[in-house]
Image (cartoon, rainbow, N blue to C red):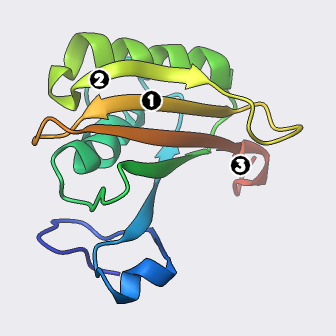
Amino acid sequence: MPEDNDSGRVDIKITTQNTLIEPKAYYIIECKRLDNQTPTGISSLNAKYIEYGIKRFVERKYSTYYHTNGMIGFVVEQMDICVNITTINNLLKNNFADANTETVLTSLNFIENFKYQYSSIHKDIGNKRIKLYHLMFDFSGNMEGK
């Protein structure tokens, strides 16, 4: 589904009853793949998770009407997901100052019996605080050839 003034496509758009009154009153969930290929590099899928995921909210390429949205990381190679979160956080701190991160990905417990749930806080280009929820799903055992 195309997004207004966006160079990409929204992966998941969740509308509410308010969307009928205010067309931008919806939530976005952006999905990105994650793997083990040079995880600390600025051309890695971790970096793309930030550049083409988190920053699309920060730069207002995706609506943040409710100042809350989500991301899903699809882990496509075996890895220690907790270590990878630390790697993403280090990239945010050291290579992506323009992600305007106030709080790096921090572990949460809002889904019972699910380990890989996080949130982060950023300021968008209008200096408004936005909260992103992050879920990491391990699909590494389901990939062809594995």
Name the amino acid type tagged 1.
Ser
Residue of label 2: 101
Q: Which mark is residue 120?
A: 1
- Return the residue at label 3: 139
Disc 1 element: strand
Task: Name the element at disc 2.
Answer: strand
Lateral position of residue 25 relative to residue 138, left or right: left
Apparent side of residue 15 relative to residue 123 in the rendered image (left or right)? right
* Place of residue 69 in the rendered image (x, y in percent of width and height, measured from the top left): 44, 52
Image point (29%, 23%), residue name: 101
Residue at x-position 18% and y-position 53%: 60
Which comes before the other along the chain, label 1 or label 3? 1
Task: Inspect the image, locate mark 2, and give the three-letter code of the amino acid beneath it.
Answer: Thr
Tell me if mark 2 has few (under 14), some (14-19) or many (20+) residues whose alpha carbon lies within 10 angstroms of its own: many
Image coordinates of residue 133 in percent, x first then y, are 53, 41
The circle drawn on residue 67 is none
Amino acid type, mark 3: Phe
